[in-house]
Amino acid sequence: MATQETTYGIHAVQTLLKTAPQRIKCLFILRGRLDQRMQKIMSAAQSANIKIDTVDRKKLDAMCEGNHQGVVATVEAGKSLLEPDLYELIKQVDGDPLILVLDGITDPHNLGACLRTADAAGVHAVVVPKDNSASLTETARKVACGAGESVPLIAVTNLARCMKKMQEMGLWISGAAGEASQTLYQAALNGPRVIVMGAEGSGMRRLTRETCDELVSIPMQGIVSSLNVSVATGVVLFEVCRQRAN
């Protein structure tokens, strides 16, 4: 298991400095970049006694595969959360838990975007199957804009079994499916809730779909038959937020 990870990008590094500065081993800053956002990052790093190296762009480019925006952090690998951690987290939620399940999301860009949306909607944890799923790569962390550090991501061996366990704990499971006759605006999405989103094109796997308590659809008005999974996730999660607020 890797003992060190790389986090890059302004938002991702800012969030890490705010939530877990003790994990940062070294901060690499683009030489000559002295704008206000970078100065804030350097100030926070200095306050936390984090080593800062100023390097050229070639060095930063070699450290990561995406747009680093002039800042890269080498980070002590975080603790991998396991299935029992999910159930303990649900028990400790003050109020109604909201869990997002992503079934078969293999693109790290989509995973990162879903994590960012989940953070904005107050999701308590994101659950993915251990196989056939994107993991929290550097790319996913960058796209998540810091949500990779704030929202627990838990990979489980048997997704259907995990869903059944959450049902036993009192959570109602709503799966998004284009063919569902009930729209998310007709469904009651408040209370302890699990939202399940499937992969683009293929959707949820059969067993995942069968384990859901209900299926809901997003009504489409134009000629496009489906939305990007991260956009669809946002639509569903914020309908949950709207209903909870009411």
Image: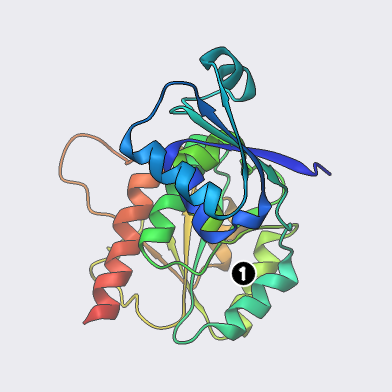
Q: Which amino acid does label 1 sit on?
A: Met
For mark 1, give the secondary structure: helix
Q: Residue sitting at 54 percent across and 48 percent down?
A: 46
Q: Where is residue 65 in the image (x, y as percent from the top left)?
A: 57, 22
Number of marks in the image?
Answer: 1
* Residue sitting farthest toward the top: 58
- Would residue 125 be seen by someone viewing this image from the given angle? yes
* Residue sitting farthest toward the right: 1
User: Which of the 4 image quadrants contains residue 80?
Assistant: bottom right
User: Which of the 4 image quadrants contains residue 89?
Assistant: bottom right
Left or right: 158 with respect to 95? right
According to the picture, the residue beneath numbered tag 1 turns out to be 163
Residue 38 position (above or below residue 115): above
Q: Position of residue 74 (x, y in %)?
A: 66, 38
Q: Where does the N terminus fall, quadrant-wise?
A: top right
**In terms of depth relative to the viewer, which is nearer, 71 or 185?**
71
User: Which of the 4 image quadrants contains residue 207?
Assistant: bottom right
Residue 68 position (above or below residue 114): above
**In terms of depth relative to the viewer, which is nearer, 29 or 223?**
29
Residue 22 position (above or below residue 137): below
Left or right: 174 with respect to 171? left
Q: Residue sitting at 61 percent across and 17 percent down?
A: 59
Q: Where does the C terminus fall, quadrant-wise?
A: bottom left
